[in-house]
Image: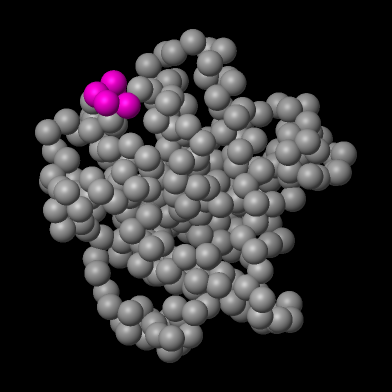
Amino acid sequence: MVFPRTSVWICHEGSRPFVADPHVATIYNRGQPYKRAHLSQDGDRSDWFGISPAIAMAMAREVGGSMREDPDRPFQAEFRPVSPRLYAAQREVFGLVQYRADSLEIEERALAVVAAAIRTPERPASGHPVGRRGALARRDLAMQARAAIARRLFESPDLSTLAAELEVSPWHLCRLFREETGTTIHGYRRDLRLRVALERLEGAAGQVSRLAHECGFSSHSHFTAAFRKQFGFTPSAVVMPGAGEQGGERFGS
């Protein structure tokens, strides 16, 4: 299970391409062939968890609802959505690895993160009946919109410019994007900026205001308010661990 740090196109063999960005966890069965194409100027960066075939089979049955018995292909989903709290939780696991915390704690929390990502419920259907061809077209347009956002994440193009790039009307783009992703275009971009900021905050003592502006926020206070609302803790808790919130408690579900 891979947690992207940047945005890339991923295409599993025999499937359709999708945008892998910090909003999702991508899933690879053993030996999964795939292709990728860069979107972000920062290239392709990610962290990942590897689990044994036995654990994968148990998770697929008990958490993911799969009855497949192939130890090399236990998972059917190619990617799953990742909530802000889950994104923060997996960042902390990698922080524990970096600081060489107790291995038992690391293993337990890593498995909890993977299970939570697999368990994440799919977004409810929009209620608009569409055929398979129409559903694929809608999915592809939403992916193209996500790619366009990723390519200019810290710029602020207006809606008309984005819609023109995708050759659709602004209204159609707004409606379809929300139905396919469960959020607005603005909300999606803000959340993606915050997830990028979470990583950049690590070791950024004294530079929070600069980072806030780099990530597209108008002020330190605007950034702090948005960050706390999204993750449940303040930027200072990342820059100076222990200053207010305590380790794993701040990442509680």
**x, y (%) of residue 135?**
66, 76
**x, y (%) of residue 14?**
71, 61
Between 227 and 133, the residue placed more toward the observer is: 227
**x, y (%) of residue 239?**
24, 30
Whether residue 147 is in magenta: the answer is: no
Kindly tell me whether residue 105 is visible in this rendering.
Answer: yes
Q: In the figure, 143 relative to 108: above or below? A: below
The image's colouring method is one colour
Q: In the figure, 226 relative to 39: above or below? A: above
* Snapshot quadrant of residue 203: top left
**Which quadrant holds the N terminus?**
top right
* Snapshot quadrant of residue 92: top left
**x, y (%) of residue 166?**
43, 81
Between 188 and 196, the residue placed more toward the observer is: 188
Q: Name the residue rendered at 25%, 48% in the picture.
A: 225
Q: Name the residue rendered at 62%, 47% in the picture.
A: 120
Q: Main secondary structure of the magenta part?
A: loop
- Name the side, left or right, on which 62 lies relative to 15: right
Whether residue 243 is in magenta: the answer is: yes
- Name the side, left or right, on which 29 lies relative to 204: right
Q: Name the residue rendered at 30%, 65% in the picture.
A: 152
Q: Name the residue rendered at 61%, 28% in the picture.
A: 111
Q: Which residues make up the magenta segment?
A: 241-245
Kindly tell me whether residue 72 is visible in this rendering.
Answer: no
Counting the numbered discs, the total is 0
- Name the side, left or right, on which 112 lies relative to 101: right
Q: In the figure, 239 relative to 229: above or below? A: above
